[in-house]
Image: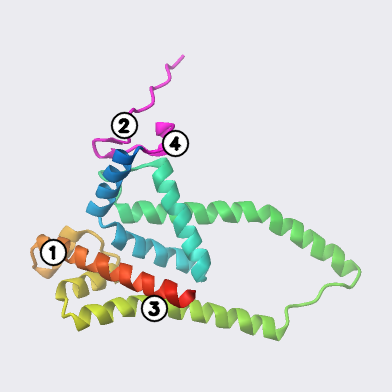
Amino acid sequence: MDTPKPKPTTAIVGSLYVGTDLLGRALTNPENKELTALLRAHDFVGAAIVSLRFAFKLRRNKPAAQDLQGRANLRLVRQGWDWKVVTLVRALCRFVWSEHTHELRETATARKAEEVFLAEEAVHGNTAAPSAEAIALRIETERREEAYDTAQMEALRAAFTATKDEVNLLWLDFMLMEITDLAEMARRSNRPVKDFYLAKDRRDRLVKRLTGAHDEEDN
């Protein structure tokens, strides 16, 4: 009989963040700070932008995409991540996909029950096809959400252009090409990798300002 492995006593062991599920408890304040520093070192802001775009492609709806990304972030905290095994952006996108497919499985039963109910209602002549107005509203909502996603990226580009931030403009182009490794960006652009790390601080501040502005508009 295999002897159960003891639970880890620290949240980060070498390159592995073990996750609260395996740890069996919540993170302490020092562990929270250590995890935050680890995520920052691996460009969490950039990875989050990519994972949100991926979530939006799956859901085509801004609130649903944000909810999906939030649950994926929670999965990362709970289940852990090893940066030597998978990049942060890939880990987040995998959790987004996992949460998406999990929800589809959960709703499959509900959808089947709905189909049975509608079939029963059809027997009594009580069903109705979606109206032209409802279909038009859905199409318009999807169009608006896609336009919002594009506007977010263009807002970044406009800000980087206005401040003549050439490195962050390069970063944005690479992110759209799904190139997320800063060393690879430096190699392709013939710039020191240090430039991209310094650009990250400027980008973080800008994203916070843009996010705050959009939150105020939503309110």
* Marks 2 and 1, the one that precedes in the sequence: 2
Q: Which residue is mark 4?
A: 21
Q: Are marks 4 and 2 in contact (CB under 8 Å)?
A: no
The kind of residue tagged 4 is Asp
Q: Which residue is mark 2?
A: 10
In the rendered image, residue 115, in percent from the top left (x then y), is placed at 76, 62
* Marks 3 and 2, the one that precedes in the sequence: 2
Residue 216 to residue 52: above or below: below
Q: Which mark is residue 186?
A: 1
Q: Residue at x 39, y 61 (%)?
A: 51
The kind of residue tagged 1 is Ala
Quadrant for residue 113, please give it: bottom right
Q: Judge the density around disc 1: few (<14), some (14-19), many (≥20) Cα neighbours within 10 Å.
A: some
The kind of residue tagged 2 is Thr
Dot in front, 1 or 3: 3
The kind of residue tagged 3 is Thr
Mark 1 → mark 3, Cα distance in angstroms: 26 Å
Task: Label 4, secondary structure: give it.
Answer: helix
Q: Residue at x 25, y 48 (%)?
A: 37
The part of the chain drawn in magenta is: 1-27
Dot in front, 2 or 1: 2
Q: Residue at x 32, y 56 (%)?
A: 89
Q: Which mark is residue 150?
A: 3
In the rendered image, residue 38, in percent from the top left (x then y), is placed at 26, 47
Task: Label 1, secondary structure: give it.
Answer: helix
